[in-house]
Image: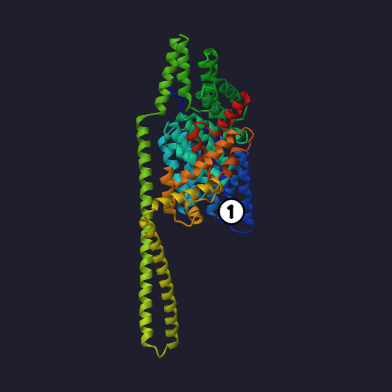
Amino acid sequence: MVRYGKTLLQVVLLILAVGCTGQRSRTHLFPHGTADDRLAEKIRGIKECFERQDARRAAELSVELCDFGKASGDERTYLYGLVYLAQSHYLSTGEIDTLCGTVDEALALAGSQKDYWALATLQNLLGSHALFRKHDYGKGLSHFLKGLRYAESSGDASRIFPIKCNIALAYYFRNDPAGLQYALDVYESGRRDDNEFMLFTGSVVSSYMYHMLKKDSLALTYIEYALPLAETYSDQRGVYSQYGDILMALGRQEEAARSYAKALAEGNDRGRFSDIDAHLGYGLYLKEKGRYQEALRMMQQGVASAGSNRQSQKLYLLYYNIASIYETLNDPAAALKYYKRYHAESDSLFNVRQEKAIGDLKIAFEKERYETELHLQKLAWKKRLQIVALLFAITVILAAAIFVLYYRKEQAYRQILKLRHETAERETWYRTQLQRYTDEARIDLDLDTDIDRKDRLHELFLQVQELMTAQKIYKRHDLSRDTVAKMLSTNRTYLSQAVSRYTGLSFVYYINSFRLEEAIRRLSDPDDETPIKAMVQELGFHSLSTFYRLFLAAKGVPPSQFREACKNKRNRS
């Protein structure tokens, strides 16, 4: 049986906290003066509590914020206190049922104030509870997608990326590849904003998605980025368990065993889903090695951990593998017992009505997004028509004014002279522009009808080749068709035609082929120790992901593996 999705609840809890810290820029919304300073201090205190995962103290400060808002009549302060209190409680217990009144009050208040940050945060909280506690994927996705729309309306990146991360996890639990784009969006946003935590969560969830899609080479690339940061964000077990799963899929079993052992030995994240993942992954390794008794003990520890922490997403996998081990050990009674548990648990997680609800939800969301984009396009065209109408009206008014001035020449002789002078200057400018456009059109016509057009294209291509091979302009980050066309005193159309005729490539692929060729040469040189990221920058690539994709297509392996293989080859020789 294919292993199902692995949960990063500790990462989910951390990204909920990040949403809270995103409020530090919002203190200007409170009244100015001493009161604002006190509120800013409380918010900083809540932020620090979330960063050190002190949910109890965060809750105390949140209550103080509520009391202050209520006493001063400041509804927004009171709202933020409610939001922080709900998140503190969820971080502490993983539950919000006992705070349903608080959450409902916060939703109503945020809706009346149109506070999109608060609405996005609360929807993310409700979605996390529905998904990770209630296992209601349809309801969880519904909350997340609502929250994403609110977050995009607020323009607060600290809200957008955690919701996208949770949407990716929700699809991951369903073995649905639709979550990959959300995970990659988080990773790319982290690279663009130079946000280490965003990069960490994006790389981990992207590795999960690629592992689910059986693209383990790509999954390995992303999880290797997260490994050095696992301790920083208290996710040693989750990251090392995932690393072990990927290594197992790549046939590197002994390395996988060491990774599972490290996941169980290190970290302070016991009691989370990653604890269960480590037991399940190590148990499967022991099972494949024929060490059935050890595998049973390992998986039963995972069952105990799931029961004591009410984390049941992984129980059906544990039950299934325990049953299969008992079946191998010729214990049919025990095997039947766990197979029954497996079917009961899996049926509760995956049912037809829930799958239909999720499918309908995806269709509704895509339809709404399409209609929104169409509406925005209509608004843009309407605005353009309004501008044209306004310009036409202005033109008519000016013409009427000129006509009136003409008949009042005795009263406004000087104004008429000035107007005629301006009109003459404008006419001269239009004639100059018309002549320039006529000359350019004539040049283009001559080029189109020239009998030796092919020779011209060949000469142009040789000039491009000279720029690439001799001057190596492909290393420039601002390189574009317009830039090269300007350097060669031609236009971008002829430049593209020349490159396409003699290489069969588009201009972008043509430029990247030189960059890729030099990258392969430098990576093949064992004496070149330039870091891959720095090399990518030097060669003019716009993003590390583009370089990895092109290199993987050309060589079939990631750059780091290619470099290592070249070094090993040299050492053997």
Residue 457, given in percent of the width and then of the height, sits at 42, 51
Residue 363, given in percent of the width and then of the height, sits at 35, 41
Q: How is the image coloured?
A: rainbow
Q: Amino acid at mark 1?
A: Thr
Quadrant in the picture for the C terminus: top right
Q: Is residue 126 left or right of residue 70?
A: left
Q: Is residue 315 left or right of residue 524?
A: left
Q: Residues within 10 Å of mark 1 (few under 14, many from 20)?
A: some
Location of residue 243 with respect to 434 vertically, above or below = above
Location of residue 480 with respect to 60 vertically, above or below = below
Residue at the limit of the structure toward the bottom, as seen here: 410
Residue at the limit of the structure toward the top, as seen here: 330
Residue 148, given in percent of the width and then of the height, sits at 46, 45
Quadrant in the picture for the N terminus: top left
Near-viewer residue (280 or 338): 280
Residue 372, given in percent of the width and then of the height, sits at 38, 50
Residue 8 appears anywhere in the view: yes
Q: How many marks?
A: 1
Location of residue 289 with respect to 15 vertically, above or below = above
Residue 94 appears anywhere in the view: no
Location of residue 570 with respect to 183 vertically, above or below = above
Classify residue 563 by image quadrant: top right
In the rendered image, which residue does mark 1 sit on?
A: 27
Near-viewer residue (475 or 116): 475
**Disc 1 secondary structure class:** helix
